[in-house]
Image: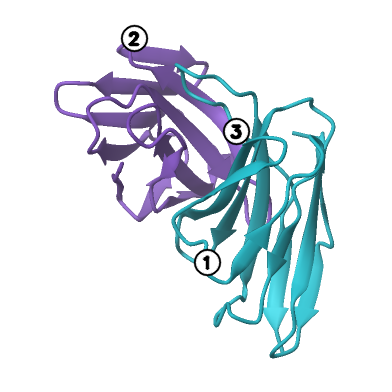
Amino acid sequence: DGGITQSPKYLFRKEGQNVTLSCEQNLNHDAMYWYRQDPGQGLRLIYYSQIVNDFQKGDIAEGYSVSREKKESFPLTVTSAQKNPTAFYLCASSTRQANSGNTIYFGEGSWLTVV
Amino acid sequence: GENVEQHPSTLSVQEGDSAVIKCTYSDSASNYFPWYKQELGKRPQLIIDIRSNVGEKKDQRIAVTLNKTAKHFSLHITETQPEDSAVYFCAASGGSARQLTFGSGTQLTVLP
């Protein structure tokens, strides 16, 4: 839990701008995730990465991009192509367990607002 | 892929009463079912989980039950307290969708 750091906690974006949310973990976890949470809704998976230099689209990847150059870091870029980016963004990580469930631990979250 | 439905979306109980939240899942191959608690403006935190080789798990005032045949699992909170007020999410994974799929959440309010 405490080993996942997201920044910034609050971010304002102007129309047409790209913004990048940072996520760093010191838990030595292989897998990292980005979720989006809208008010009154559940968590929807944007992107995930099981290993360095590899990542996969989740359910709502359009308008977002990621990179995984280091095991500890998984930044998320919200591009201008994302038409409704105002939301609470949660980064998470887990050990990579092939045959059993992954216990996911979340960062504190980042609030993104379009102004 | 997996689809998880959660009910009810809101639940109010009197302090000291029990609360039950139910989830159903679609992928019979799913084998891991965690529950998360999220307080307002904070991150979800794991409170209990169950794997498909057991039918029930307890941890003090909370318990989770799993019915694999019916593909549903439930969270039970006994002797509720005001600090139990939060949004609770169920999730499932381990089937064709290897990643966790979350339910839509239940806002639990414990009335003093």
Q: Residues within 10 Å of mark 1 (few under 14, many from 20)?
A: few
Cα–Cα gap, marks 2 and 3: 20 Å
Name the residue beneath numbered marker 1: A38
Measuring 47% from the left and 33% from the top, which residue is drawn there? Answer: B35
Res. A30 image quadrant = top right
Q: Which chain is purple?
A: B
Q: On the image, numbered disc 2 is attached to which residue?
A: B54
> Would you say B51 lies left or right of B39 here?
left
Question: What chain does mark 3 sit on?
Answer: A
Give the x, y percent position of residue A104.
60, 33
From where the camera sits, is residue B91 visible?
Answer: yes
Task: Please tell me whether residue B18 is drawn above or below residue A7 in the rendered image.
Answer: above
Marks 3 and 1 belong to one chain: yes
Separation (CA) of disc 3 from disc 1: 19 Å
Q: Which residue is mark 3?
A: A104
The residue under the point 43% across, 33% down is B98
Quarter of the image where the C terminus of chain A is located: bottom right
Q: Residue furthest front?
A: A53
Q: Tell me the quarter of the picture where residue A1 sits.
A: top right
Q: Could you tell me the amino acid type at mark 1? A: Asp
Q: Seen in the image, is B94 located left or right of residue A7?
A: left
Residue at 78 percent of width and 79 percent of height: A12
Of residue A5 and residue B74, the one placed in the foreground of this image is A5
Q: Colour of chain A?
A: cyan
**Amino acid found under the numbered disc labelled 3:** Ile
Across and down, in percent, residue A55 comes to 61, 45
